[in-house]
Amino acid sequence: MFVALLLVAIAGLTMPGESQAPIKIGVIEPLSGPVAASGNYVRMGAE
């Protein structure tokens, strides 16, 4: 009985994990007007 439980526990540890959905992060920056250059730098850094 102990050996069977040990084998089940080991099999559970070696199974590949499920992939998760990607995490999306939003950035709000101005892309027009007098501060557009700053907003473009932030956008490029976030990408």
Image: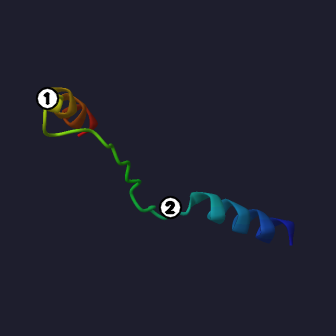
How would you rate the neighbour count of disc 1 (Cα within 10 Å): few for under 14, some for 14-19, many for 20 or more? few
Q: Nearer the viewer, residue 40 or 34?
A: 34
- Looking at the image, is 5 positioned above or below residue 30? below
Q: Is residue 33 left or right of residue 16?
A: left
Q: Secondary structure at mark 1?
A: loop
- Mark 2: few, some, or many residues within 10 Å (few <14, many ≥20)? few
* Vertical relation: 19 (above or below) 45: below
Amino acid identity at mark 1? Pro
Residue 42 in the image: state x and y as whole percent.
25, 31
- Please state the total of marks drawn on the protein image: 2
Q: Position of residue 13 (x, y in %)?
A: 63, 58
Report which residue position mark 2 lands on.
16
In the rendered image of this protein, does residue 22 appear above or below residue 47?
Answer: below
Q: Which three-letter amino acid code belongs to the residue tagged 2?
A: Pro
Colouring style: rainbow
Residue on which the image places disc 1:
34
Quadrant location of the C terminus? top left
Image spot of residue 2 (x, y percent): 86, 66
Left or right: where does residue 29 sit relative to residue 31?
right
Q: State the residue in front, 35 or 24.
A: 35
Distance from Cα at disc 1 to Cα at disc 2? 51 Å
**Residue 41 left/right relative to 2:** left
Q: Nearer the viewer, mark 1 or mark 2?
A: 1
| Circle nearer the N terminus (1, 2) | 2
Please report the residue visible at 77 percent of the width from the left and 63 percent of the height from the top. Answer: 6
